[in-house]
Amino acid sequence: MTRTEHDALGPVEVPADRLWGAQTERSRQFFAIGVPRFVFTRPVIRALGILKKGAALANGELGTIAAERARLIAQAADEVIDGALDQEFPLVVFQTGSGTQSNMNANEVIANRANQLAGKPLGSHEPIHPNDHVNKGQSSNDGFPVVMHIVVVEGIAHRLLPAVTSLRNTLAAKAREHANVVIIGRTHLQDAVPITLGQVIGGWVAQIDAAIAGIGLTMDGLYELALGATAVGTGLNAHPRFGATAARYIAEETGQPFRETSNHVAALSSHDAIAATSGAIRTLAAALMKMANDVRLYSSGPRAGIGELRIPENEPGSSIMPGKINPTQSEALTMVAVQVYGNDLTVAMANTQGHFQLNVYKPVMLHNVLESIELLADACRSFDLHCARGLEPNLDRIRQHVEESLMLVTALNPHIGYEKAAAIALKAHHERLSLREAALALGHVTPEQFEAWVKPEKMARPHGGA
């Protein structure tokens, strides 16, 4: 059951019950690469609808298309924005590098739906033509970058930042709760001087805060939209005020401060703003990986490892070892972080492929940044709910490690010097003595001096400074 659609190359048979047209069908046939994992995602389809609605309203305001045509296009585009037509977007990531086929997919779906609303049959191209009316004032070369920016801005604002901020707030509360729990510090994976658990968790919070701020610094570039550039950045066939007017409508639709780009040529031939944001998201992934790895190391054991943190007992950890509990939330989050690093490398390499007036790696850049946003958002929410909120210190194990640590001897440095303190530590280690026993045996301190100077809780407090 097909109908005959046509484009500039001739007739194409399209499934009779689908809203897409000739160019979408050609892409389905010629690019059967991978699974439909790109335009089939809600954020991208929504952004395509926002683009076309904003363009239609701008063209209507500027008088470049009739008001009734603008109204029909906007009405059909609203259905795309709301998700009513998601099944009409079947294309994959690996298509034309300009995103032309996805742009035309949106043009065709919206035109056919608008014509349905006007009482006309599918494929009639009347009163709405996909190129002449839905795509008016646009090229795929400037329209698809707009979709890229809308998707990334909304994904960060509505998905990533809320999830990361919730995890950050959970950790900040844990840092305050355990501000006075003194644990042994570790450097080079070896014992070091004491620190508080609150300071450790506060370090994780500070890294996340810095990463969130870093993402924020990249947002201004994403607010610039390429509309008004058309094919090569000259604005051919677009009204001089089309870019600014369409950007205003898109800003109103999304609630984000989108504006027309300051340089249309650069907006088509490179995507530095996308690459910068991807790099900032990668930095966030690094902060989250450090935190997740610390959690699984502190909780290792629980008896033959460090065992200073208790993690929630969410599920059995082994199919053969009864009672085993594994740090699965840390494992999932760190796997996501590794994937984000791979995605960022793809984006960085793709951004180098701006030849002359067009970068033709747009769809794969969008796919990878969007995947990073969504994976990190999901992983942060999962880690927050199923691990961070249930983290608790194992106070007995923490106390044991602090009392047994050789590096408490560092507190003696100002009083007896580094070399004598080192002799105490090495004697205690080699002869399996406590620090106190070794210090008294060597005669470097009195019992009263040792008790007065070696105080873990005092060592863990900040020293020096104002």
Image (spheres, rainbow, N blue to C red):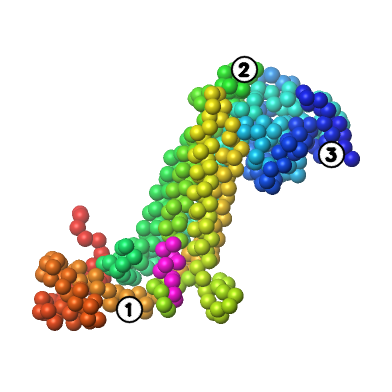
Q: Is residue 176 left or right of residue 264?
A: left
Q: Is residue 117 something that shows in the picture?
A: no
Marks 1 and 2: CB-CB under 8 Å? no
Q: Earlier in the sequence, mark 1 or mark 3?
A: 3
SS at mark 3 in the image? strand
Q: Earlier in the sequence, mark 2 or mark 3?
A: 3
Badge 1: residue crowd in 10 Å (few <14, some 14–19, many ≥20): few
Q: What whole-number distance in Å separates the C-alpha atoms at marks 1 and 3?
A: 71 Å
Report the amino acid beneath label 1: Gln
SS at mark 2 in the image? loop
Q: Residue furthest right?
A: 1
SS at mark 1 in the image? helix
Report the amino acid beneath label 3: Pro
Q: Is residue 408 left or right of residue 88?
A: left
Which residues fall within the magenta stretch?
Answer: 293-302
Q: Which residue is mark 3?
A: 15
